[in-house]
Image (spheres, rainbow, N blue to C red):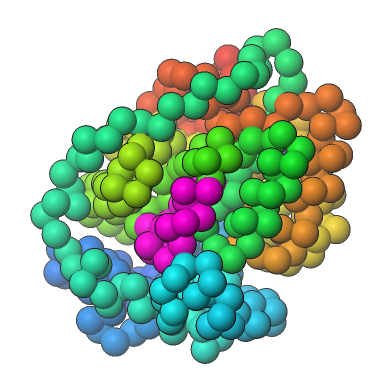
């Protein structure tokens, strides 16, 4: 367990740095939503502050928007329209800091983003059923997770996972689901687990409980309509919620125990190196919105499988009855001590 201390500390440091790097946008966004009591994305777009409604603005674990030179400016309308069928609605967080960044706010200003009392009404669709064929109490397992998608590299990652008979969990952003609905269907068809990563990558710590619920329920409802199931696990952008908030949300929360920092390095070799260091029980954090990560996945899968590790969904790793109010990942192992 001692080996985790640096990892957790590093995550904390990254989060702290991220908070400082995007505090301005995040504050604007949160304040705006607090004043109106409405969904933050709509409020932010109404203020005419595009950067405030980007997924990164409220993020703390991901600072894609704070990093220039990402190479993501190569996003082209053709790529986006191919994947989404909605030209112009690229909804790609990798476009942050680029002209494409503004396009990410397009969905936020659409009618679908209008705050609706229904957003807080729980969907009737059942939770996604993850059968799995792997018993992680008997064999070594690692859970790869990909946040902030779906995006234009998701299919490449799906193909790599499927080719190796590996499973993973994708923590989806609502605005990305709207932009890439076919990729969500592809994830489900490939046997991947879906997770809730809020509607617009909101920093939940800045929202009221009602606003938090709206952020999550809106994603559930979107997925219920699209694929007929709702996600089991929540991963709050930034990861940090206090214990009372975690309990109040009444959802299993999955953080991570191995942070590849792929969003920061955008380096395939480094992402392979860190992800391949995972040990049984680990939850590995990556993002399926970066080309460097997509390029890393085949080798990561190969390295981990070569050690005899099974690459599984979170439900397979944690079990069918995850405990509410804790965040799995930060030292949490299946059957291990609970972490708050
Ligand atoms: Zn994220």
Image location of residue 50, percent across then percent down: 37, 82
- Left or right: where 264 falls relative to 250: right
Depth check, front residue: 146 or 16: 146
Which residue is depicted at the point 82% across and 32% down?
Answer: 305
Residue at left 39%, top 70%?
A: 26
Please say if 51 is above or below 340. below
Residue at x 62%, y 56% (from the top left corner): 155
Q: Position of residue 232 (x, y in %)?
A: 40, 33
Q: Residue at x 21, y 35 (%)?
A: 124
Q: Which residues are magenta?
A: 170-186
Is 104 located above or below residue 258 in the figure?
below
Q: How many marks?
A: 0
Q: Is residue 75 magenta?
A: no
Q: Is residue 57 above or below residue 142?
A: below
Relative side of 92 to 279, left or right: left
The quarter in which the N terminus is drawn is top right
Compared with 70, 240 (above or below) is above
For residue 95, what is the image quadrant? Answer: bottom right
Q: Is residue 182 magenta?
A: yes
| Horizontal side of residue 168 vs 199, given as left or right | right
Q: Is residue 269 visible?
A: yes
* 124, 316: nearer the viewer: 124
Q: Main secondary structure of the magenta part?
A: helix
Residue 57 percent location from the top left of the image = 44, 70
Q: Residue furthest left?
A: 117
Q: Is residue 243 visible?
A: no
x and y, in percent, of residue 144 in the image:
65, 40
């Amino acid at each position: 367990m001692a080996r985790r201390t640096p990892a957790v500390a590093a995550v904390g440091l990254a989060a702290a740095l991220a908070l400082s790097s995007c505090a301005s946008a995040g504050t604007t966004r949160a304040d705006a939503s607090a004043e109106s009591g409405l969904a933050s994305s709509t409020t932010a777009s109404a203020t005419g502050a595009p950067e405030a409604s980007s997924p990164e603005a409220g993020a703390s674990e991901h600072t894609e928007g704070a990093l220039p030179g990402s190479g993501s400016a190569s996003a082209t309308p053709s790529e986006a329209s191919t994947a989404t069928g909605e030209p112009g609605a690229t909804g790609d967080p990798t476009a942050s800091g680029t002209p494409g960044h503004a396009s990410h706010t397009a969905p936020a200003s659409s009618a679908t983003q209008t705050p609706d009392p229904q957003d807080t009404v729980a969907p009737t669709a059942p939770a996604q059923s993850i059968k799995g064929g792997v018993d992680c109490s008997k064999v070594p397992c690692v859970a790869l997770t990909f946040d902030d998608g779906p995006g234009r590299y998701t299919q490449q990652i799906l193909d790599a996972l499927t080719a190796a008979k590996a499973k993973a969990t994708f923590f989806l952003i609502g605005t990305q689901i709207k932009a890439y609905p076919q990729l969500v269907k592809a994830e489900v068809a490939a046997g991947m687990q879906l997770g809730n990563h809020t509607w617009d990558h909101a920093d939940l710590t800045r929202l009221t409980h009602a606003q938090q619920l709206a952020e999550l329920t809106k994603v559930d409802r979107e997925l219920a309509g699209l694929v007929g199931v709702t996600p089991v696990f929540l991963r709050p952008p930034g990861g940090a919620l206090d214990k009372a908030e975690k309990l109040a949300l009444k959802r299993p929360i999955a953080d991570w125990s191995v942070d590849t920092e792929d969003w920061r390095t955008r380096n395939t070799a480094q992402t392979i190196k860190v992800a391949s260091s995972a040990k049984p029980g680990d939850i590995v954090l990556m993002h399926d919105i970066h080309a460097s990560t997509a390029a890393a996945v085949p080798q990561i899968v190969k390295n981990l499988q070569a050690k005899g590790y099974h690459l599984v969904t979170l439900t397979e790793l944690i079990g069918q009855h995850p405990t509410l109010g804790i965040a799995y990942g930060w030292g949490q192992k299946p059957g291990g001590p609970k972490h708050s």
